[in-house]
Amino acid sequence: MIKLFGVPRSRAMRSLWMLEELGVPYENIKTDFATGGTRQADYLRINPNGHIPALQDGDVTLWESLAINLYLARKFDKGLWPKTIAGEGHTFKWSIWAMTEAEEPVLTTLLHRVFFPESQRDQAKADDAARRFETPLMVLDGELAGKTYLLGEQFTVADLNVASVLCWAPMAGLDLSKAAHVAAWMTRCTSRPAFAKVMSMTG
């Protein structure tokens, strides 16, 4: 059985969402960075970076949430893997874009507005990150104009990967309403039953 190491309230949520979309059996092994679980020797043998999530599927071990999702979507498909080579290219593009352009400003804003203790928050850093987020937000909004999903009319791993990064934005107080196409697309993505199930998980 597939093993997914991590806790739902972390980047592991992204891969839990994919597993729920695919409906494949898996075991979620609760490994929490907040309690030092990611620095234990047993876990470091699985992911020497000491981060979550990590996945074990037989003799395959993977790190990095979006790479895990690409692997799972490709292996099990269920309609989430693109049907063309061009679609695959766009899926890789948007998955890498989510990590290089969108995640950092969202996460920085979230940390300094919500997660850090008051004494560690830097309002200037939060405001700067919020401003920087506007650029990738409008790039995505332009891409989604006239589209239901990133690759067309069907929800795919490209949507799941990007939406799973951007779903932190509202928690950070980042307003998506100025990007109407993104806001509507996010509603479609996060209204899926698999997403709701992961959001109901504890830990």
Image (cartoon, rainbow, N blue to C red):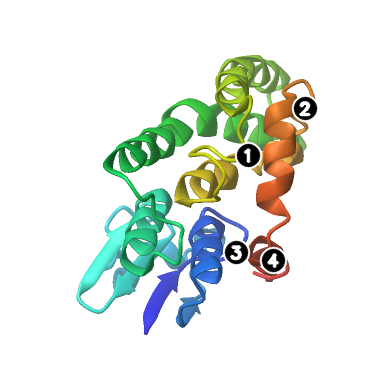
- The residue mark sitting in front, 4 or 1, is 1
Graded by Cα atoms within 10 Å as few (under 14), some (14 to 19) or many (20 or more), the crowding at tag 4 reads: few
Q: Which residue in the structure is indicated by mark 2?
A: 175
Indicate the quadrant containing the N terminus: top left, top right, bottom left or bottom right.
bottom left
- Give the foreground label among 2 and 4: 4
Which residue in the structure is indicated by mark 4? 193
- Between the residue at mark 1 and the residue at mark 2, the CA separation in whole angstroms equals 20 Å
The three-letter code of the residue at mark 3 reads Pro
Q: Earlier in the sequence, mark 3 or mark 4?
A: 3
Q: Quadrant of residue 44?
A: bottom left
Horizontal side of residue 147 vs 36, given as left or right: right
Disc 1 residue type (three-letter): Thr
Q: Which residue is mark 1?
A: 148
**Percent of width and height locating residue 157:** 46, 51
Which residue in the structure is indicated by mark 3? 8
User: Which badge, 4 or 1, is on the more N-terminal residue?
Assistant: 1
Q: Nearer the viewer, mark 2 or mark 3?
A: 2
Q: Nearer the viewer, mark 1 or mark 2?
A: 1
